[in-house]
Image: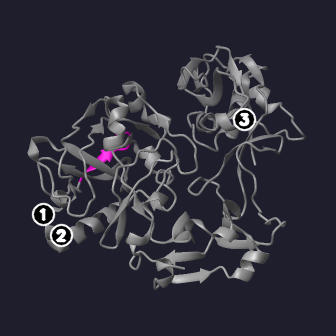
Amino acid sequence: MKALKNLSVLAFYLLSNLVVSQDTMYVVQSGGLIGKHPASIVDSIIFYDPVTLDTSIINDSIIMDADRNIYTSVKIGNQVWMKENLRTSKYSDGSPIFNITDNHDWTRYHWKIGAWCNYDNDSQNDSIYGKLYNWEAVKTDKLCPTGWHVPTDSEWFVLKVYLAAEGHNGAEGTALKATSGWDDDENGTDDYGWLGLPGGLRSPFSGNFGNISKVGKWWSSSEVENNTSEAWYHQLTSSYDYISSEYSHYKKSGLSVRCLKNDDSIFLVNDDSVLAVYGIAEIDSVIFYRPNSSPTITKDLTIGDSALGGIVAYLLQRGDIGYDVNTQHGLIVAPTDQSTGAKWGCSGTMVNGLNDYDYGTGKQNTANILAGCSETNIAAYLCDTLNIGGYSDWFLPSQEELFKLYSNKNIIDGFSPAQYWSSTESGSTGASGWSLDPEYEVQFTGRKRNLQYVRAVRYF
């Protein structure tokens, strides 16, 4: 082993006899398989502490997002930051982030959708400034590449305190700003290679863009205490030398994102080349199996699998209500549509208890619809009376549950380019749903008497 072997870190090596007898390495998270590598190509598995990590020996090419954009990094104090703003259009698990270009759509925060856009919806701004994201995308904890995260408010202050201690007190912003690209010749000195650029923002109220070349604003992952509509951010401006850290933004604002390296990571190394990187917090165990054997993974369902009467449409993740580290739970969707033209029903009647559109509310919504509406062959009735493979606990998905289907529709397959009802009511004469027409993929509110498509789901 070369330079990596000489580091004073916790490490263990794959001995030659181990490589011969047990040649497959599985990386397991909460009983689920998240990585698989031939042991024959791995020299060592190394656990790094951020204080002892020598970033000069780590290949920058390992920083890759789900779009396969490549980033480089810089170490400032004990923190390792990306040197560029994030540009991904996918979460780290490969699922898409919505690209919302329309101003009105951007401001409709009740969608609860993670979204991105380019400044002025111009893709030429992407390579320079990165994308702008709303905070719904930030809070998923999947926005940055594996092994990286959106920094907390406290982590931003760690950076600020370090810069002040290094002689930049009151001029921390100048030390981070790029040496070109700022209006009025208010460029920085970029002492650490952080390359801070003024990517502007998108308004949470109008959806308009502003302040490019004047202001750079970066989200933190920290919400404002006792204020669910705002989160903290940090900014550099052409007018001031310091980092502005005392402000919050509405979560539906579009701001830049700069990722910070997780405290600890596992690097899989072959001949001083890093093959893969995993955050320590994501991994329960690393297991080596003999050739021609299979690992016993207690949770092996993936989205798109045929199981439990239908197709796996969504798997609960950390942070989701009902998530269990020991057992898989999620959403099964019926393999085909239950109707290509059904009413929502109860037109002119407000059904009590249907103002909640969150995940986990669809089953109760369906029960409330049937209790408050005597019509048959409406969307909720068609789902409730469904029996597939002995499973009879189907229901009409809530707005958020329908959105989960929409997010994974390319994996699930079988959806028509049409509008589908949800069980979320929007008034006495209206209800909501999602259009899966690729020409107009958007949430809609329709009259209850309209004929729309229906697809049932069930929990597992």
Question: Mark 3 or 2 closer to N-term?
Answer: 2
Q: Which residue is mark 3?
A: 367
Q: Residue at x 31, y 43 (%)?
A: 129
Which span is picked out in magenta?
A: 247-253
Residue at image mark 1: 170
Farthest residue in the right direction? 390
Which residue: 80% across, 66% down? 296
- Circles 3 and 1, Cβ within 8 Å, touching? The answer is no
Q: Using the numbered discs, state the Cα–Cα distance from disc 3 to disc 2 in whole angstroms.
A: 59 Å
Q: Mark 3 or 1 closer to N-term?
A: 1
Q: Position of residue 377 (x, y in %)?
A: 78, 20
Q: Give the amino acid at mark 3.
A: Ala
The amino acid pointed to by label 2 is Ala
Measured from the top left, where is residue 104 in percent x and y?
A: 39, 25
The crowd level at tag 3 (other Cα within 10 Å; few <14, some 14-19, many 20+) is: some
Residue 9 in view, yes or no: no
| Residue 448 image label | none
* Numbered circle sitting on residue 164: 2
